[in-house]
Image (cartoon, rainbow, N blue to C red):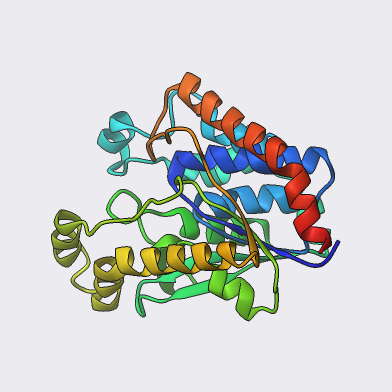
Amino acid sequence: MKPAGLVLEGGGNRGIFTSGVLDYLMERQVYLPYVIGVSCGACNGIDYISRQPGRTKSCITACDGEEEPVMGLSKLFRTGYYIDMDTVFHTYPMELVPFDFETYFSSSARIELVVTNCMTGRAEYWDERKDRDRLMQIVRASSSLPFVSPMVDLDGIPYLDGGLADSIPIRRALHEGYKKAVIVLTRPAGYRKTAGRASVRLAVMKYRAYPELVKALFHRHEIYNKSLELVERLEAEGRVFVIRPKAPVIGRTEQKLEKLEQFYQHGYLTMQEQYGALMEYLEK
């Protein structure tokens, strides 16, 4: 099997599709040497490196210690934010859904977690192999959506969701020397992102102290669509292997367990169907 990168798109709870894909690969001991993940793709990515099938799915479908969903209006009214990030990135990995830090830190595989620097508006690519809290802070930054999550401080600099600057980091994987790439998307073929005028106006008001971040938000759909165009071109040339949903996708904040389970199974079965083709691609 020739070295290949694994590129994981985010998408909030749509990332449970990716969980199904990766769980199937982990069950068959298919581990690629380089992973780059964004937002929920970062969450999936670290669980792939720590070799914990089912963990990301458990985090997406779990409740907090009070059996209350970690996102929703109740969290908004109580904390001021729609998602309880403290539960997701501290209570889960340390207590409720334990993360295997030892396996992660000792892995020889490379992983890059994409974050957006709020001062520059640009993507950065981080990892951590010693400090448990710092690793979770990086993943938290990669997953912190604007407007509904607070900025995350890393070395005195504020960060937000990596998808604001690099939603599908295929260019980064190619730059790092991986001529082959397996790309897991959470949107169906043909999808294109449109400009969100209301969100841009809100960004101007909320993030006026961060003009480069506002620019990134303004151009996000353009950057995303250009990345999709590159992925589709490379796919047509046979240079990358793309796994994407074929069934109708769920929403970013979907919380109905039945729909989450169905979308997880769709990811698992999609990978099962494409497994032979993937192995053929990796052996070329």
30 vs 135, left or right, is right
Q: Residue 10: image x %, image y %?
A: 49, 52
Which residue lies at the image location 31% right of the left edge and 44% below the top edge?
81
Quadrant of the rendered image containing residue 24: top right
Q: Is residue 53 left or right of residue 270?
A: right
Q: Is residue 10 visible?
A: yes
Tell me the quarter of the picture where residue 240 sits.
Answer: bottom right
Instruction: Identify the image quadrant of the N terminus.
Output: bottom right
Residue 201 lies, in percent from the top left, at 13, 61
Is 258 rendered above or below residue 19?
above
Q: Which of the pair 38/173 is nearer the observer?
A: 173
Is residue 227 left or right of 174 when viewed as pictured?
Answer: left
Q: Toward the viewer: 173 or 122?
A: 173
**Residue 42 in picture, x, y percent from top left:** 57, 55
The residue under the point 41% across, 34% down is 250
Q: Nearest the camera: 199 or 117?
A: 199
Q: Residue at x 78, y 44 (%)?
A: 276
Vertical comparison of 49 with 231: above or below: above
Give the number of callouts: 0
Percent from the top left, x then y, of residue 114? 52, 65
The reply to whether residue 95 is in sight is no
Which is more toward the observer, 89 or 57? 57
Where the C terminus falls, by quadrant?
bottom right
